[in-house]
Image: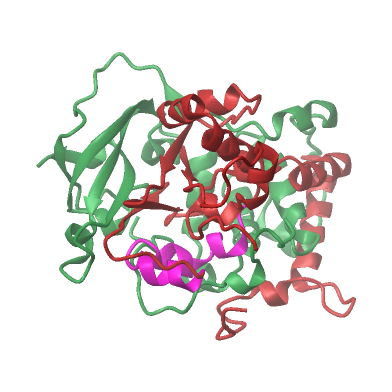
Chain colours: A green, B red
């Protein structure tokens, strides 16, 4: 989707907020509610109503002004509320009231505390076995798609419709575009594609700088 | 302090914590959400507590050990460049993510890492990302004007150095192998670890030897 989250190359904003943290002085969290939001989000993930790609999409779908105005963890909280409502874990009425609707069933958590902590740090790898050979080889010149669709995608706007070179291949990975809407993993070959800065940004860019992006096979075509 | 031209609208995290002992709106909202979900039975208070603690402690910065090894052991550096995940696994670091791509700085090439679409970061190697890495402005600017961005971190690169920006938009995680600075001959790995900073492994600064 052509959303506000797709920030690469957007100009007219200010300096990087480095002053918060020079070299690791920053605490992991700045307030108690931040790890609480992350904890709630992780725990609700065990209901398997969404996956990592759908979770990312919930943040991309925030109203643009909220996306730009919210802090990192505020976005996580707002996206979580939307996910829980859209998957039926809670209703907007329950959130407004702050309590379950009268007579609501009481669920049983899908995970218990003992098994929880060992699961937590485990990311779920996105690589998958595939029998289909890669369509592209290292050194191939490819052109990226102009636009995919209005759902979740990992093809950033600033590389769309541009020509780049495949510099490495990583086997097949879960395709975020279908996985986000629970429409299947559709594993596709993933490649690192290198673009020259001038291809992306024009003649004002340095003549030798580059940007690399990791792209799924259906994002690219032979150039 | 680099500058103070930030306002609360662009950086609301500065207002979102507790202030003068009064719980913030988000403190109240997150607690209300927690209570509601516990009432629903979909999670328990113990789980929330255990998870919060795990988030605080589970992601130590182990990157400096890896880079110090790469600086002192050429065979390990080759291994790291060829298969980052297997190389760090050989040091007992289980990355859990799919693949780690190590990119090496040289006198001719400088690498820097970003995630323009969200905030992908090698958490299992470097810990949780700093606010600036997750900031809209870093994500917007470093792909289009990496040199001015690096200059804000105090890093000046010669125009003839090739700058490679890596946008980690998939589940590949990137780490920069900085150049080992002059004046560190004969240093132990432990000494080297001291100067290998998180920011250098993201590529926004260069390791320096303090006088």
Residue at the limit of the structure toward the top, as seen here: A131
Q: Nearer the viewer, residue B209 or A58?
A: B209
- Residue drawn at 53 percent across, 25 percent down: B87
Name the side, left or right, on which A150 lies relative to A124. left
In the rendered image, residue A205, in percent from the top left (x then y), is placed at 23, 67
- The N terminus of chain B: image quadrant: bottom right
Q: Nearer the viewer, residue B157 or A81?
A: B157
- The C terminus of chain B: image quadrant: bottom right
Q: Establish if A109 lies above or below B120.
A: above
In the rendered image, residue A93, in percent from the top left (x then y), is placed at 70, 60
Q: Nearer the viewer, residue B194 or B88?
A: B194
Q: Nearer the viewer, residue B195 or A90?
A: B195
Residue at the limit of the structure toward the left, as seen here: A223
**Is residue B142 part of the magenta span, yes or no?**
yes
Count the marks: how many?
0
Name the side, left or right, on which A191 lies relative to B202. left
Majority secondary structure of magenta residues: helix
**Is residue B105 part of the magenta span, yes or no?**
no
In the rendered image, residue B186, in percent from the top left (x then y), is placed at 61, 40
Q: Establish if A164 lies above or below A136.
A: below
Q: Is residue A186 visible?
A: no
Q: Establish if A189 lies above or below A56.
A: above
Q: Is residue B30 visible?
A: yes
Write down the region rendered in magenta: B129-153
- Residue drawn at 38 percent across, 37 percent down: A178
- Residue drawn at 68 percent across, 42 percent down: A42
């Amino acid at each position: 989707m052509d959303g506000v989250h797709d920030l690469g190359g957007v100009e007219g904003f200010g300096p990087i907020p480095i002053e918060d943290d020079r070299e690791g002085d920053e605490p992991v969290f700045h307030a108690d509610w931040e790890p609480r939001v992350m904890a709630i989000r992780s725990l609700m993930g065990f209901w398997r109503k969404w996956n990592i790609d759908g979770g990312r999409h919930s943040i991309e779908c925030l109203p643009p002004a909220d996306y730009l105005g919210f802090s990192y963890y505020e976005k996580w909280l707002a996206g979580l509320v939307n996910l829980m409502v859209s998957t039926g874990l809670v209703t907007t009425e329950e959130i407004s009231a702050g309590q379950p609707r009268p007579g609501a069933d009481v669920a049983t958590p899908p995970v218990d505390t003992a098994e929880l902590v060992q699961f937590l740090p485990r990311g779920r790898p996105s690589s998958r076995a595939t029998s289909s050979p890669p369509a592209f080889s290292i050194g191939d010149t490819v052109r990226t798609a102009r636009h995919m669709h209005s759902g979740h995608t990992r093809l950033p706007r600033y590389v769309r419709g541009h020509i780049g070179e495949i510099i490495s291949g990583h086997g097949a990975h879960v395709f975020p575009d279908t996985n986000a809407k629970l429409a299947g993993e559709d594993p596709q070959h993933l490649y690192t594609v290198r673009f020259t800065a001038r291809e992306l940004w024009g003649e004002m860019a340095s003549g030798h700088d580059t940007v690399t992006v990791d792209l799924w096979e259906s994002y690219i075509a032979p150039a | 302090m680099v500058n103070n031209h930030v306002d609360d609208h662009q950086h609301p995290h500065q207002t979102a914590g507790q202030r003068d002992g009064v719980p913030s709106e988000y403190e109240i909202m997150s607690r209300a959400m927690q209570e509601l979900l516990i009432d629903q039975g979909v999670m328990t208070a113990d789980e929330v507590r255990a998870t919060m603690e795990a988030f605080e402690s589970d992601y130590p910065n182990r990157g400096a050990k890896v880079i110090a090894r790469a600086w002192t052991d050429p065979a390990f550096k080759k291994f790291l460049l060829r298969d980052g995940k297997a190389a760090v696994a050989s040091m007992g670091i289980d990355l859990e993510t799919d693949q780690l791509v190590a990119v090496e700085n040289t006198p001719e090439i400088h690498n820097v890492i970003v995630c323009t679409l969200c905030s992908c970061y090698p958490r299992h190697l470097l810990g949780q990302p700093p606010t600036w890495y997750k900031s809209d402005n870093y994500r917007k600017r470093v792909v289009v004007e990496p040199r001015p961005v690096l200059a804000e971190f105090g890093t000046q690169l010669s125009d003839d150095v090739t700058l490679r920006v890596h946008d980690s938009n998939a589940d590949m995680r990137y780490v920069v192998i900085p150049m080992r600075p002059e004046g560190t001959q004969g240093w132990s790995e432990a000494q080297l670890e001291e100067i290998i900073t998180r920011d250098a492994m993201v590529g926004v600064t260069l390791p320096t030897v303090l006088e």
